Image (cartoon, rainbow, N blue to C red):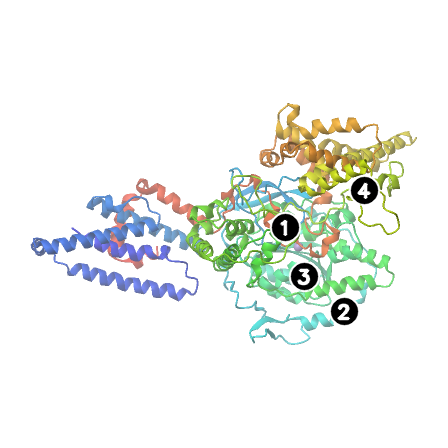
Amino acid sequence: MPRPPKRVHQEAKKESAPPDQPPNKSAPENVEAFTNQGFKNVIAATKAANAFPQGTARALYLSYPGYARVMDDLSQRVVALIGNVLKANNIKGDIRKRQVEEQFEMVQESNDILFERITTNLDIKSGLRRNPQEVVETQVDVMSSSTSAEPAEVSPQTQETPKAGSWNRTTGTPQRNMVSARLFTAKNIVRPQTQFKEPVDNSAQNPFVPRLKEKPNSLKPLALLPEYDDAGNIQSYLHPYEFELLKFQPAADQLQKQKPVLPALMANTELMVVDTVEKLEQALEELRQAPQIAIDVEHHSYRTFMGITCLVQMSTRSKDYIFDTLILRDDMHILNLVLTDPKKLKILHGADLDIEWLQRDLSLYIVNMFDTHRAAKALNLARLSLAYLLKHYLDLDVDKSLQLADWRMRPLPQQLVDYARQDTHFLIYVYERMTNDLLQQHADPGLLGSVYQQSTDVCKKRYNKPHIGPESHLDLVRKTKRSFDNRQLYALRGIFEWRDATARSEDESYGYVLPNHMMLQIAESLPREMQGILACCNPIPPLVRQQLHTLHQIVLKARDQPLVKPILEARSSTQASLPPSTKDFSSKLYCPHDFSHLEEIRDDLPTLLKRSSTSGKLEIPRAEEVANEGLPIAAPAMALFEKQSKPTQEEEQRWAHLRKESQTLRMPYKRYLAILPLMVQLKADQLARERSELQKRQLCPTAPTVEQNIKLEAHAIKKEEDVVYSVPLKEQLKRKHPQANGKPDADQQPTTSKRPRKDENRQPKPPVKTEPVEEVQQGAGESDDEVVEVPIERQATERPKPSPAQNKRQQKKNQFQRGFKAKNRGNHPQSSSQQIPQHTGEGNFDYKNVDFRQFKGGAQRARGTEIKQQIRGKNRPNNRNNKQFNKLFTFSNVRKEGKK
Ligand code: AMP
Ligand code: MN
Ligand code: ZN
């Protein structure tokens, strides 16, 4: 009786082991060694099982109570072990509770499931099985500039209400520079890295090594020259074209005035999708004839550690090319023949990252580049984005809403092809116009020369792998403006290192493994239970779930640390005085690490200057207006020039009030509320000014020009649709509030009901500086309710389901802004030097409409298949066959099946 389970156990153990093994990344030969060892074990086990007495001998042996007892114990142990194996593989049912017959069946069934999983995984790995790609599109709002250095998180989302540490950014504050973007991705995207001939080396200890094998257009022969750190380890390698870039001088005709030639429409231009080596060679021949080539790169950074170059677009004057660099990853380097040719001009826009991606994945380098982003900066253009340049020079409104597309999708949807094309199609023309503009600004080619110099410096950039140091986690803490004690820091460091190691070994981005805000949440709250760790994450990143135990150990170890002097560094007095954190995890407002909503620079906040309603100029207010501002809070103890007079009773009172006032800590939001009336006034002034101008225009005898018409129209849209970026924050709040609230009760609408009342009271008064002060006092005295009632939160949660009207509004808004807000990078002249699109920071997406599951490309698919198979269980049509086959398999030849 006990025999069959025993044999089965050995088999099952051996066969189910592979999926159960921790991923062994080191080398494929280990798999072979592992398999060989497995076979040996199976043979040994079979021999051992066969050595047991059988038939009548067995019956005889069993009549000895001792023997029977031992056999019984052993078989129970074996069944328990099998149970563990099955449980570890997520196979439902407890084998121990089954009858012997059923036990046997269950083991067969389980083996069947495991084999199917293995073959599915192998198929996926080898790229044989590709479920048809199902394109998923979602509308999201993203920041129009990415400030975070973290890899893009085009990522999961749940429909649940947001919790602490949620993907959902419950920022509350409407964002001035939010733009609508479409998440454009697909289910079942195959992880391209599984197809790479040369696997990527994510390890921290090895520096990135250029893989260049030939060096066309060289002045110095190819040599990989290492740079060493203090310890004598190779830190990096010199740029292979360092010398050539050093020697590079733009040709004379590049420094002369150009004759801009408008490119043909994209529809009338030939497109070559280069996805084979033959086509690549053909493209190279054609590109060799072109004096200028526009280039752009599309990249994926979420489901990979270092990033993957998915697409390279090129345009000559007469033809567009799209290179599938997932397929041609190892062949693209032949294009160095033209890309490093100093006589051929390469035009890119904001090439900093493109340069790194090209050299990292494709061994492509560029000599002789004109960066239109740098040129836009030199020309002091209002905006530096490509979208703006296309608007400026071609009056083109390009749609950049697909910037969040998952460029790994294959076949590439037509929309993405068109989208990618427009990034290079017009660039040569833009370059010509910019060259002329640069020469016009400075007759001698100094300015133009400096653009070439800067562009050449960009070409010298070298790719460096991401790495973390022992202190890296502290940077994060500093950004949070929270004080972590030594335990929390200990945990953070541990989790930080775990995340780094996991991201490297699993080839996923930090953002995918564990986003910053969740990581901080865990380190800060140091949950005692595993469940607590999960509570810090919403949705739970798959790798966190998978390695929950490891994370838990890190947290427990941190909890065991003796608590020593808190606070890692001196903090400002306001921060030090913050009370110890009392967290409410269920509070939607509790999102301390979420800084995504903070804007770096705001230039539209009110100042002491007032805009004149007549001239429209900023004016310094008259002395009386500001007089109140400078009033001292307390009577001076000593007067240098005056004899000190006793303060009047009135002064005493005022001082007392001001003292009290200065002691109450005012929340930023209250300060913001306090300043609202001033902004209302400013707005009113501006409207009045605009209206008077409008009237002036209407009085004008000539009919309005087209341009004026457009302006008027735009103005109307602006007023009606209320979501234009220039509309101040409070306007948005004010207008959205009634809808979000949905209650007609006036009390529920403090911003709309209370504010006008105050305004009424103040009406006779001229708009003077005293207003904010007045408001501050009122605000402080009045109630906290007013603050609480403003439904920031509700608004944020409401947004996921925009009403049709809102949708329309959104569309109109998009139409209206397309030309200006489109391209994400370089929209802010102030910070443009860092504006090259990094990755989307985790804060940049509002995941409100995103379905978590939709972003599980690649590896996630395996899990989907598994579950399905598990559910199908016995009801599979070929179950019987499978079972028989499986029985055969289980007891005979594994190799045969492995090759199925
Ligand atoms: P572009 O130069 O605009 O074509 O962008 C090149 C690549 O930069 C894209 O394929 C994206 O991977 C990345 N990228 C650009 N903008 C963003 C953004 N706002 N968020 C995330 N990634 C971006
Ligand atoms: Mn680009
Ligand atoms: Zn692009």
Residue 370 in the image: x percent, y percent?
A: 74, 60
Label located before the other in sequence (1 or 4): 1
Instruction: Tell me the tag on residue 629.
Output: 4
**Does residue 415 appear anywhere in the picture?**
yes
Q: Compute the Cα span from label 1 to label 3.
A: 59 Å
Q: Earlier in the sequence, mark 3 or mark 4?
A: 3
| Residue 249: mark in rendering | 2
Per the model, the C-alpha gap separating discs 2 and 3 is: 21 Å
Secondary structure beneath dot 2 equals loop
> Mark 2 near mark 4, Cβ–Cβ under 8 Å?
no
What kind of residue is marked 2? Gln
Q: Left or right of 72: which side holds 304?
A: right
Look at label 4 and name its amino acid: Glu
Dot placed on the residue nearer the N-terminal end, 1 or 3: 3
At horizontal 26% and vertical 62% (from top left) the residue drawn is 41
Q: Which of marks 2 and 1 is in front?
A: 1
Occupied quadrant, residue 311: bottom right
Q: Which amino acid does label 1 sit on?
A: Gln
User: Residue 53: horizontal and vertical position, in percent?
Assistant: 12, 58
Pair 2/3: label in front:
2
Q: Which of marks 2 and 4 is in front?
A: 4
> Alpha-carbon distance for marks 1 and 4?
27 Å
The quadrant where residue 232 appears: bottom right
In percent of width and height, residue 633 lies at: 77, 43
**Residue sitting at 83 percent across and 42 percent down?**
646
